[in-house]
Image: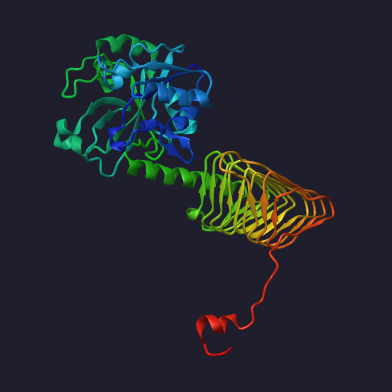
Amino acid sequence: MSLSVIILAAGQGTRMKSDLPKVLHPISGLPMLHYAIKAAKALSDDITVVLFHQADRVRENIESAFEGIRFRIQDHANYPGTGGAVMNVETRHDRILVLNGDMPLVTAESLRPLVESDADIVMSVFDLQNPSGYGRVVVENGEVQAIVEEKDCTEEQKRIKTVNAGVYVFKKEIMDRYLPLLSNDNAQAEYYLTDLVKMARDEGRHIKPVWVEEEAFKGVNSRYDLAHAEEIMQERIREKWMRAGVTMHLPRTIYIDSRAVFHGDCTLENGVTIHGETIVADSHIKSHTVIEDADIRNSSCGPMARVRPGSILEDTHIGNFVEVKKSHLKGVKAGHLSYLGDAEIGEGTNIGAGTITCNYDGVKKYKTKIGKNVFVGSDTQFVAPVTVEDNVMIAAGTTVTEDVKEGALAISRTPQKIVENFFHRFFKTGKR
């Protein structure tokens, strides 16, 4: 498609009350600006992001995730406002989509009706039951006649429910003609894109309104807006995966990162949280389990388990209060109350309750290797680095500090001692 895109991401976002640039606040695992860029890349090969506030930080984030994005720093001191933001932006194509970086719910599909029109200016609008506080868009005979700020509206214009959604498509020659004529002679002393619409209208150019869904064009200006957008995004993500065949129990209690992927027959119970670039395939994730950047295949996790980044579970069951970190478990059972960090554990191995891999010595982290068909008794500690070969038994309560060879039993316990009648002597119960 012969279309250039300019994404406005220069604002400070003071209502967010945060040191983090507004457009980098995450929604479902990704900075909100990434969603606008993804929508733009589905429509165009020529994308420019306009920056100003913490420009280097925002640019570094974008460049780590996308290729082929161009940047322009707004001359905010001399040309503030949305009109100033698009001044002197070089574009390759004859039509230009101007998009806002704080619209994380926008999609390529929601933008297509705008970019498919051939009007001089295409303007996104939507209708509100209560448009109080918004400027009104006056539409007659299928053309935008005016954008009127509420304070300037007549009583008749106040009854108009159509408002500006803030996304435009301009013919390049329209921007080339009218941008040099923009003035900042207004109360805010800023340059506004809406003034291009007025100038073009005054010269009889064609300005077409396109009605869009309010949800998709929702801007995020506060933490409340951020939370609301997250709810909408989560609903979309859950619907997508349920339609793809994932079973969800009480889906509104489940959080799924936008980067997570599911394959095959999967079930997520209530309260599950899935972060990052997690892959879940043919697996059952039970109630209140948290998974982060992990690969889960033909396995079950939980309830109340935690799988941390870098973990791979294959044909494995981990139960309640089991934590796995940066470990590869294949064909393993770890039913409850264990920590398995920086470990490699083979098929047929059973991990008893209370097992811990002691992987950190205060300076470095070390690996524990446990082979196939190993029976690990309850309350075992593996002091890494340590290797346990196949077909080994580890007695309950053992602290493993040395490698264990194939077929052996490892046991380290303090011998049990029984002192007769100690209870009665200690508490002076009278019985001796």
Say which quadrant the C terminus sits in. bottom right
Quadrant in which residue 100 is drawn: top left
* Residue 391 visible in rendering: yes
In the depicted structure, whether residue 33 falls above or below residue 229: above
User: Image check: 133 left or right of 281?
Assistant: left
**Could you tell me how many numbered marks the image carries?**
0
Q: Whole-percent x and y of residue 15?
A: 28, 36
* Residue 43 visible in rendering: no
User: Image check: 31 left or right of 223?
Assistant: right
Q: Whole-percent x and y of residue 130?
A: 25, 44
Name the residue at the bottom extreme. 430
Q: How is the image coloured?
A: rainbow
In the depicted structure, whether residue 227 falls above or below residue 119: below
In the depicted structure, whether residue 401 falls above or below residue 91: below
Quadrant in which residue 106 is drawn: top left
Q: Whole-percent x and y of residue 241?
A: 57, 46
User: Image check: 273 left or right of 284?
Assistant: left
Name the residue at the right extreme. 407
Q: Whole-percent x and y of residue 223?
A: 34, 42
**For this rendering, which residue is in front, 209 or 420?**
420
In the depicted structure, whether residue 53 falls above or below residue 179: below
**For this rendering, which residue is in front, 386 or 258?**
386
Residue at screen point 68% across, 50% down: 282
Residue at screen point 38% across, 45% down: 227
**For this rendering, which residue is in front, 319 or 104?**
319
